Amino acid sequence: MSDQYTFKEFKSEAEIRWCPGCGDIAIIKAVQTAFAKMNRPKEEFAIISGIGCSSRFPYYMSTYGFHTIHGRAGAVASGVKIANPKLSVWQVTGDGDALAIGGNHFIHEIRRNLDIKVLLFNNQIYGLTKGQYSPTSKFGQVTKSSPYGTIEHPFNPGPLAIGAGTTFFARSFDVNVDQNVEIMLEMDKHKGIGIFEILQNCVIFNDGAHKLYTDKETRDDKQLYVKHGEPMIFGKNKDKGIVLDQNYRLKVVKIGENGITEKNILVHDAHNPSPILHYELAEMVDPIVTGIIRMVEKPTYEDELYKQIDAVKEKSKIKTFNDLLFSGSTWKVD
């Protein structure tokens, strides 16, 4: 099955209507490339979206898909997964769709641990409706709906998802195509909710929002790509790392200074059941942490649901629809 598809076979015939240079274009290439490597028949994929630029995704993919309503992609994706657990369900959403009107669905989808893969595009702005501030816009950001600067403090999707109990959280940037493919392949193997925050550039209404982290001159010193079982080392010269300070907080150090060697650098443990360090990693901004930050095992909602259904059926006298129809008092009409 792994040789059955190329990324081109996951492209639909619909013309992509995102703006030239939109980060979504790089993301869809990564998704199509990853899907082709997932060793699944095309008919097992279902892409569910809400409303926003990101939510045009189902039209551009040659898979099953459903473009739903604002903030409700999680509710529909949950129903799809429960109705047919064999499907690989991918929810495509944005920072506005998921974290504003869809915020309640988002946290409870995580809490239930449904086996749904959520691609959360975060451009820190409402793009489709032309440039209003979103739940992830920076404090003080001037937008069409905050001409004097927003006075709301932003959500950070990573700590939010980890606090809600996610079993998988990863983060990356739209331009990191190879890295994004690698993360999605691992997320596909994970049994349970997957939250993948993709920091994406809106070239029209919030261009350069992630510039500090993606520019060639600064990205190596501002991004820390973590891998399970490997020391958390980064920097243009691979001479920076993460340690725990005396207050048990994460701290950036320079290797070779103050007696620090590679042996002092923390090794990333994505499988640690405790979310404390994962939460701190997701909160960091200098550097920002990318890669798979958390991946732990926990029973899924749909597995527990069908287990309960089977247990109830086993004890019930009613085994079929006819058993139900003719149970209790019945009358025969001639």
Image (cartoon, grey):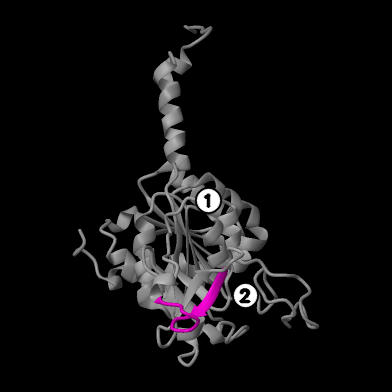
Give the residue displayed 56% in from the left and 61% down from the top: 279
Question: Which label sits on residue 124?
Answer: 2
Residue 258 shown in magenta: yes
| Relative to 144, 19 lies left or right | left
Q: From mark 2 to mark 1, how far is it between C-alphas?
A: 24 Å
Q: Residue 196: in sight, yes or no?
A: yes
Seen at 49% across and 52% down, the residue is: 77
Residue 173 visible, this orientation: no
Residue 76: x %, y % from top left: 53, 51
Q: Position of residue 298 (x, y in %)?
A: 45, 44
The single residue placed furthest to the right in the displayed view is 148
Query: In the image, which residues are magenta?
Result: 250-261
Residue 129, image quadrant: bottom right
Location of residue 232 with respect to 317 vertically, above or below: below
Whether the magenta-drawn stretch holds residue 247 is answered as no
* Amino acid type assigned to the residue bearing label 1 in the image: Val
Q: From this viewpoint, which residue is outermost toward the bottom?
A: 217
- Name of the residue lying farthest toward the front: 259
Nearer to us in this view, 249 or 138: 249
- Residue 253, numbered circle: none
Nearer-N-terminus badge (2/1): 1
SS of the residue under disc 1:
helix
* Residue labelled with disc 1: 76
Callout in the foreground (2, 1): 2
Of the 4 image quadrants, the one containing the N terminus is: bottom left
Give the class, few, some or many, for how many residues have Cα within 10 Å of label 1's Cα (few <14, many ≥20).
some
Name the one closer to the observer, 38 or 283: 283
Disc 2 secondary structure class? loop
| Residue located 40% across and 83% down the image | 238
Dividing the picture into quarters, in which one does residue 247 lie? bottom right
